[in-house]
Each structure stands twice: as structure tokens, then as C-alpha cells.
Image (cartoon, rainbow, N blue to C red):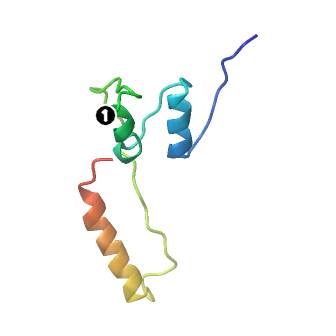
Amino acid sequence: MNLNADIYCNNGDTCRKIMLHHGGISKQPNFIIDHDIKEGRLSPILSNYEIEDLNIYAIYPSRKLLPLRTRCLIDFLIIELKNSQW
């Protein structure tokens, strides 16, 4: 019986649960797995390996009629996420 299976998942919490049940390895942001690493449930591997940065995009219909609150949210996210250590 083959117990190996390819799993494709784009949800961090689901990936975390799979890792906790010895289902493989995954690159996850610190806010999802830090507690598990500190408690010894997960171990970092390939710490010196650098992966390509992931980007976040704000998509909106037009700059011409962009509501002020949307512009303020975008500006806030740019500042807050710029130095994030995820």
C-alpha cells in the first residue's frame, strides 16, 4: 500500500496541520508557525535557503475615482507590510 500522496494546498492553517501530522514540509509565515517552533512541535529546516519574495497586490477598478478611504487603506498597508517578517 502506497501512503505517499501529493497534496496541494494554499491555506496556511491547513498546511500547518498537515506538517504537525508528519505530512511533509512547507514554507509558512512566522505568524502561523512560530508558536509551534517555540513549543518544539515543528523544526525549521533549510534556514539558510532564500526563496523568492511573494508580493501582495491591491486591485481596484480605477485611480481616477478611487475613494479616499481605499487610498488610505492602501497607503496604510504599504507602510505596515513593508518591514513585515512573514
Q: Nearer the viewer, residue 38 or 55?
A: 38
Q: Residue at x 65, y 26 (%)?
A: 6
**Residue 30: x %, y % from top left:** 34, 43
Q: Residue at x 33, y 23 (%)?
A: 46
Q: Is residue 45 left or right of residue 23?
A: left
Q: Nearer the viewer, residue 14 or 58?
A: 14
Q: Residue at x 67, y 23 (%)?
A: 5
Residue furthest right as drawn: 1
Q: Residue at x 52, y 78 (%)?
A: 61
**Residue 28: x %, y % from top left:** 42, 40
- Image height of 18 relative to 56, above or below: above
User: Which element type, helix, strand or loop, lies under badge 1?
Assistant: helix
Q: Is residue 8 left or right of residue 64?
A: right
**Residue 19: x %, y % from top left:** 51, 30
**Residue type, mark 1 in image:** Lys
**In the rendered image, which quarter contains the N terminus?**
top right
Q: Which residue is mark 1?
A: 38
The number of callouts visible is 1
- Check disc 1: other Cα within 10 Å, few if <14, some if 14-19, many if 20+: few
